[in-house]
Image (tube, rainbow, N blue to C red):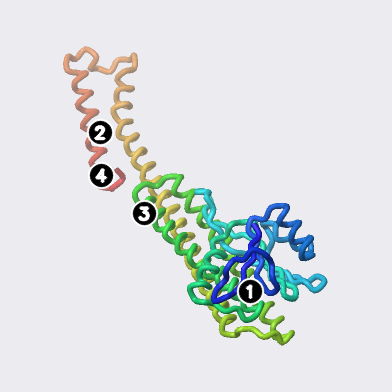
Amino acid sequence: MVKFLTCQSGFFERESWVPDCWINVLCPSESDIRYLEDEFNVPRSFLNDIEDNEERPRMEHEEGWRLVILRVPFKTDDNDNPFITVPLGIITKGDLFITVCHYEVEMIHDFILFSRRKTYEEKKREDLLLHIMLTSSVWFMKYLKQVNVQIKQGEDELERSVRNEELHRLMKLERTLVYFITSIRGNEILLIKLKSMFKQSEIQYDKDLLEDVEIELQQAHSSANIYSHILSSMMDTFASIISNNLNIIMKRLTSISIILMIPTLIASFYGMNVPNFIEEWTFGFACIIIVSILLSVMALVFFKKRKWL
């Protein structure tokens, strides 16, 4: 879907393109891609790169066009993998500013509403680029907080019952954090390149805004690392608990087997078809049973005192 947005105390949609407007393309169809190619001569290679879900954050120039690819967070409907990162392409040339993403990311809608609430006045294309980067960093933080809530829920469930389902869910959250850390780090490197390019080309930009982007990216990176370390240590702890519980169970089963082995051994001796001097005794069977019970009780008391049972 192609939308044209102009800034008038915030971004508002209009029906057609005008110079210096923002062309926002989310979940583009093939006709939308052809429209960008035919109407604005956007390089097809740029559009193909943005479509690649594994594309890393980077910047590229071609025939006066500039492509900036960010990794932005996206919340899916998949319970097994609720958070991923996807590429967002920002294509600029002259008075053209185009954003393309093949996912319906929340951060774009949030930024548009935010610009209206704050009566945002656009000054330069570079500032809009930095604002989008800042918004992506804020949404990384929002999703990281949701991941942290799910980690705490998983921890509570594991404390009640250690099951494979909870462990698998925590493993998937750990994978999500790895994706977040990698994407945020890539965005940080991209920001360094943009800052260097702005200085070399003497491009005017909002230095305070760029500093805000740097701070938010650092905070998101730091938070993702902290949550990842917490989750890793928690998984290691529960792995140790599971191993310890298994050892306790095996120790108890072994103790029970030894206790049951005593009457079994006595019964085996006196069950042999050989003379044992009590086969004719009236109370022989009762005596064997009593002795077996006494020896088993003695073994049980011994194991209890040694805390083996």
Q: Nearer the viewer, residue 55 or 117?
A: 117
Marked residue nearer the N-terminal end (1 or 4): 1
Mark 3 packing: few (<14 Cα in 10 Å), some, or many (20+)?
A: few
Amino acid residing under circle 1: Leu
Residue for badge 2: 296
Q: Looking at the image, do the residues carrying marks 4 and 2 touch, with CB atoms under 8 Å apart?
A: no
Q: Nearer the viewer, residue 170 or 18?
A: 18
Amino acid residing under circle 4: Lys
User: Can see residue 286?
Assistant: yes
- Quadrant where the N terminus sits is bottom right
Q: CA distance from mark 3 to mark 2?
A: 41 Å
Amino acid residing under circle 3: Asp
Task: Find residue 304 and name its label.
Answer: 4
As helix, strand or loop, the secondary structure at mark 2 comes to helix
Marked residue nearer the N-terminal end (3 or 2): 3
As helix, strand or loop, the secondary structure at mark 4 comes to helix
Q: Looking at the image, do the residues carrying marks 2 and 1 touch, with CB atoms under 8 Å apart?
A: no
Task: Find residue 129 and name its label.
Answer: 1
Q: Where does the image place residue 237, in percent across and percent down from the top left? A: 43, 57
Task: Find residue 145 and name its label.
Answer: none
Residue at 52% x, 50% y is 77
Q: Where does the image place residue 282, in percent across and percent down from the top left? A: 17, 14
